[in-house]
Amino acid sequence: MSLHGMDLEQGEHLAKELTRASQRFAQLSGQLTPHIAAAPWRGPDGEQFRSDWKAHSRMLLATSDALRAASDAVRENVRQQQDASSGHTGAGDLWDGTGGIIDTVGGAVGNGLGWLAHQASGAVSNLGDAGGDVAGGLGDLGGLGWDFLSTGEPPSITELLAGGTGLLAAGVNAGVALSTGGLIHPHILDDGSPVAGDPQPVGVGSDPARDGHRSTPVPSSLAQLMGGVTAAYDDGGKAGTPDAAIRITAVDKGNGPAYIVTIPGTSEWNVRSGSNPMDTVGNLSSAAGNMSTASQAVEMAMRQAGIPSGAPVMLVGHSQGGMTAANLAADPEFRSRFNVTNVMTYGSPIDSTRIPSDVKTLALQHPFDVVPRLDLGNSKPGGPGPLPWESSNSATVVTLPSPPGSGMGDVVGNHDYNAYVASVDANESSGALAAYRNDPSTQAFLTAEPSQVRSTTSGIGRKE
């Protein structure tokens, strides 16, 4: 008699081998890309070699993704075989599936309409895009509802207000597009789609600027880590980073590299979608608890930089950059691709973001900085008034002394990223800051040796 079905033990073994192979391809890209990008080979041949390597690196990452998908498929078949063998009725799957439907139906419809928009042009494209945004907005709000059902924690007031505003704007866009036969699409609060450029090597420490990009500070302290964010702010509008940029810094002290991803905050204030994702539109999307275009662009840049899946990653961000870092760390799919061990934010409202407790998170704020309090302390709707609620994460929240000369009404001075760097520099030798800096997870990213550090800048953007 022939045997039908799967040997479960062999299936699990195959899935593990496929996962290991996926990791090896990603690690190979991650190990070679920084060396090739920084190789002292000038002239046409060197430029051609580096250009060719970009294509090879993408093929390695694509192979890694394919192997990971194959591993997931094998594990799913193992699970189905186990269910069939045990006479499982599928009630649990029905419950989980219900959540998936609520959480993704809007996104699925939105993706379908988005595909239609990309296949068509002109008026039809505008109509498809506007309709997809409405469906996506409904799906996002449905996702908040499902989170409530599955975790028992209702969405925060800020998430509901931001999500509702985004859906209202999508409805306005769709109404204008429909009433004009698709000739006009206002793109109000339309977060669009992410784009990311290839990593460009930059100097470290006292190295001279490269193509106008200042060198990344040697990450010897928390304040110097924040200096990487300051450098990323300065990258905007430079060669290769026309809109906004992030810095990716590798620290290798002999046990393999650990990666610091530094993300700047808002650099444009507008309500109409533009090419810079670090803007008002991106702020609203992040506040609603969504994976904003900025967050997706950061992930794209990290993948293109070849960060291996097992390497420690620290996300550091100011204001919107901190919200982006927190939303990435809270996303299970992102964490399945990158080993996020640490998050550090300053001037960022992240109380409503569900960062897992095993990610060491430090949230810094000034006493009179209103921005990190825009999530209203994770307050929930409670009838006639707000309902107090604990933070959705286990972040260590540190309120720093006010910046010198900044009073209660100085909104800009209390939120300034340079003021935060100065505050941390003056206070990180004691208390909670010193405890975070000295934690073994954080120490993996700190060094005083420039020879142990490599750094790149990557442009991030948005397209309609």
Image (cartoon, helix red, strand yellow):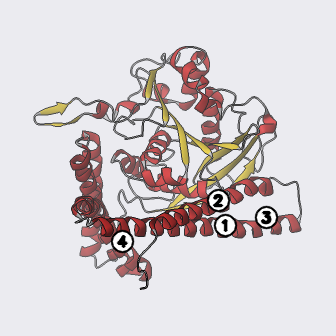
Mark 2 element type: helix
What's the residue at 88%, 68% (across, down)? 45
Q: Amino acid at mark 4?
A: Asp
Q: CA distance from mark 1 to mark 2?
A: 7 Å
- The mark found on residue 60 in the picture is 1
Q: Give the mark nearer the N terminus: 3 vs 2.
A: 2
Q: Amino acid at mark 2?
A: Ala
4 lies above or below 458: below
Q: Which of the two residues, 442 or 268, is positioned nearer the viewer here? A: 442
Callout 4: few (<14), some (14-19), or many (20+) C-alpha neighbours within 10 Å? many
Foreground tag (4 vs 2): 2
Q: CA distance from mark 3 to mark 2?
A: 18 Å
Q: CA distance from mark 1 to mark 4?
A: 32 Å
- The mark found on residue 129 in the picture is 4
Mark 1 element type: helix
> Mark 2 — residue?
26
Foreground tag (3 vs 2): 2
**Quadrant in the picture for residue 153:** top left
Mark 4 element type: helix
Determine whether label 1 and label 2 are within 8 Å by CB.
yes
Determine whether label 4 and label 2 are within 8 Å by CB.
no
- The mark found on residue 7 in the picture is none
72 sits to left or right of 390: right
- Where's the N terminus, which quadrant? bottom left
